[in-house]
Amino acid sequence: MTENASPPTRVLVLSGQRTVKMLKDRTDYEVVYADEGMSLDMLLLADFPLEVSFDDWEALAVQVAQVHAQRPLDAIVTGVDRLVPLAGMLAERLGLTTGITEEAARNCNDKAATERLLEAAGVPVPEHRVVRSAVEGVAAAGEIGLPVVVKPRDGTSAAGLMHCETPEDVEEAVADILADGRDSALIEEFLVGAEFGVFASRVGGKTTVLYVVEGDVGPPPKFVKVGAWFPSTLADGQLAEIERLTDEALTAVGLDNWVASLQFMITEAGPKAGEINPRVSGGQGVELIAATSGYEPTLVAVEAALGRHVTPTEPLAAAGLYRSIVFAEAGRVRYREDLLGSIEGLESPVPPFIEFDVRPGDAVLPINHPRGGAFGRVVLAGRSADELDRDYQRIITQLDLRVERAGAVEAKVERAHTSCC
């Protein structure tokens, strides 16, 4: 560093390898990386690796305070839902003036608290009830009107969500949630309409909607997100309304100097707000945003925690398509693994991103099976939606993707539910 050069911005990253790698590609950041069971690659990559236990927040706070005394931190960031309240707590303990608060993080992570705060602020949300027993759940569903959606208060995306058409369905769904050790469940009105995802930053009390993507949701009872596309089909007036509601929603939960991924559904009665996830979009959804918006979402998140806005660059593409790899039946998946990096004849100038969570011959389960969901993803960016649809079909055809029926494959799939991005 030269004599007149500014010192690097020092950021503590709680888990999240992508954030570390992105920051290390730049010269203006120094990275303190805290994680459990850190790999050798990450130990070598971080400027200051910190082996921690995320189960003991007080001990971790002591470790971080010791680091801060020697290497003053400018911000604390994470993209892991359960660690966002920890980031807020640590920032408050260290006296940092920017970044999410622990209260705001918990307001977002608790779906019932989110809906209560939004409703009080005049933001439309589904009719809902918090229940603490299967009997209460059946009664609440009767008040709201079947069908309903039953979900954990602390889940993300479609994890743990069930569509219930009968009192017996509700009773079983609530019992399953309580059996996992939770003390309550959330019963929601079942909404019909188009789903839209919003990526926004809020810095110094000013909300900026950076991206709006239209979602493609699978069938009940789990509503797995099977894909998304950009740009959305929202009219200008609808987009303006979503932007207004986004600002009001983030204000209601107290989120500032941070980012959020929000869900809205456009119903016959107008837009209704769903989840607020205080993080960048999960999985490879971040690649879709980066390619088609000009914003690098991970950098936006870091800069927001520092209380700073980001200026977008020229996007690589005008349209984007995200497709989850899902299956209608159980069996063993087959595809041409040797062709993953060499698909021919694609129209888009942007290379595709193709990722499988299973190898050829592995067992897979249907989309609505408890251990089913998405088994991979394809992310495309190009000049138009039609171009991307054609490229997607070329990819599936050349990979010869299919499922061969096989008996007794259920026990072979040991994995948590994956909704999509």
Image (cartoon, rainbow, N blue to C red):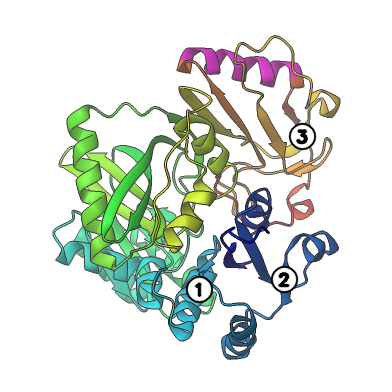
Disc with the residue nearer the chain's start (1 vs 2)? 2
Observer-side mark, 2 or 3, equals 2
Q: Residue at x 52, y 43 (%)?
A: 296
Tag 1 near tag 3, CB within 8 Å: no
Horizontal side of residue 62 vs 51, given as left or right? left
| Residue range corresponding to the magenta coloring | 386-398
Disc with the residue nearer the chain's start (2 vs 3)? 2
Observer-side mark, 1 or 3, equals 1
Disc with the residue nearer the chain's start (1 vs 3)? 1
Q: Amino acid at mark 3?
A: Val
The numbered mark at residue 87 is 1
Check if residue 392 falls in the magenta segment: yes
Residue 138 seen in this snapshot: no
Foreground residue among 173 and 29: 29
Res. 12 image quadrant: bottom right
Secondary structure beneath disc 3? Answer: strand
Q: Residue 235, how many percent across, how many down?
A: 23, 27
Foreground residue among 103 and 182: 103
Q: Residue 285, how many percent across, how many down?
A: 54, 41
Dominant secondary-structure state across the stretch colored magenta: helix
Q: Residue 346, how many percent across, how many down?
A: 66, 13
The numbered mark at residue 333 is 3
